[in-house]
Amino acid sequence: MKRFSAYIVLMTSAVAMLALSIIPDSPFSGINWALLSVCIVGIAILMFFVSFEKKKVDPKEMALIATMASIAGISRVPFAIIMSLQPTTFIIMITGYVFGSQTGFVTGAVAALVSNFFVGQGPWTPWQMFCWGLCGIIAGQLGRKSKEFNVKVFAAVAFCCGFMYGWIMNIWHWVGFVYPLTVKTFIATYIASIPFDSLHAMGNVFFTLVFGKSFFLILTRFKRRLTVDRP
């Protein structure tokens, strides 16, 4: 609980400062938000990885995380030509759904890092790590409430996560590439992203409907074996 409270304080402070930067003659108006935003998101990711490191993780679970993160990351590469359409979000979410929020976050963060070795690293990478990690957290919380896999519910959440991912990444695009930082340019940035966010959301639903049940059964079987094999 303390960990999540720290995240909330960190991100709320960042949003408040960002809002103040829009006000003319504000002491925050001259801040390099592209650089500061990367630092803030990087700190949030580091905090989560530190908390994950303190957890006693089975080597087999670490191997699973590495495998699923690699699959999620590499699966993005063939779809790179189609903006926003990829199975990465679905794979991250189904992993988080079965193995929990912490595993989901780490899988999402590592997947973003892995995939960008192929499609391009940059200051946007920490933002993508954070967004996909957040998708893993949300799916993990959903999985805690049900032992069965409800395709419709998962697809609905995956659909919403597609838009959430885009809305958060829009903040990076706005502070990093748009000038000046005003309410008008902020709204214009979000309007321009609607087609891409919609494609991402619909892609999540498609991959869930086609592969959701199969992935759930495979990962659940592995989770049972992992639990049985532990001393």
Image: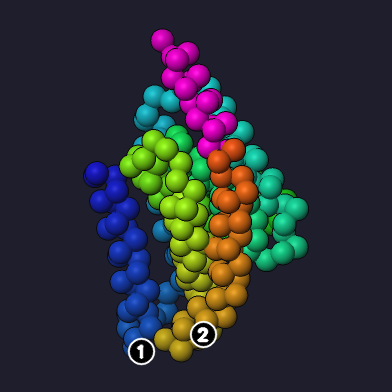
Tell me which segment is drawn in magenta: 215-231
Q: State the image coordinates of residue 139 (x, y, percent, origin top left).
A: 43, 47
Q: Is residue 213 above or below residue 161?
A: above
Whether residue 45 is visible:
no
Q: Is residue 18 positioned above or below 127 on the image?
A: below
In front: 101, or 173?
101
Q: Nearer the viewer, mark 2 or mark 1?
A: 2
Which residue corresponds to mark 1?
24
**Of 185 and 224, the residue lying toward us:** 224
Residue drawn at 61 percent across, 56 percent down: 206
Look at the image and say whether residue 195 sits in the magenta stretch. Answer: no
What label does residue 95 carry, if any? none
* Sequence order check, earlier mark of 2 and 1: 1
In the rendered picture of this protein, how many numbered marks are placed on residues?
Answer: 2
**Is residue 221 part of the magenta span, yes or no?**
yes
Q: Main secondary structure of the magenta part?
A: helix
- Other-residue count near label 1 (Cα within 10 Å), few / some / many at <14 / 14–19 / ≥20: few
Give the alpha-carbon distance from disc 2 to disc 1, as whole Å. Answer: 19 Å
User: What's the residue type where badge 2 is placed?
Assistant: Ala
Amino acid, disc 1: Pro
Q: In this view, does 157 lie to the left or right of 215?
A: left
Residue drawn at x 33%, y 42% as measured from the top left: 145
Name the residue that disc number 2 marks.
Answer: 188
Q: Are marks 2 and 1 in contact (CB under 8 Å)?
A: no
- Of the 4 image quadrants, the one containing the N terminus is top left
Indicate the position of residue 7 as horizontal and vertical percent values. 32, 53
Q: State the SS at label 1.
A: loop
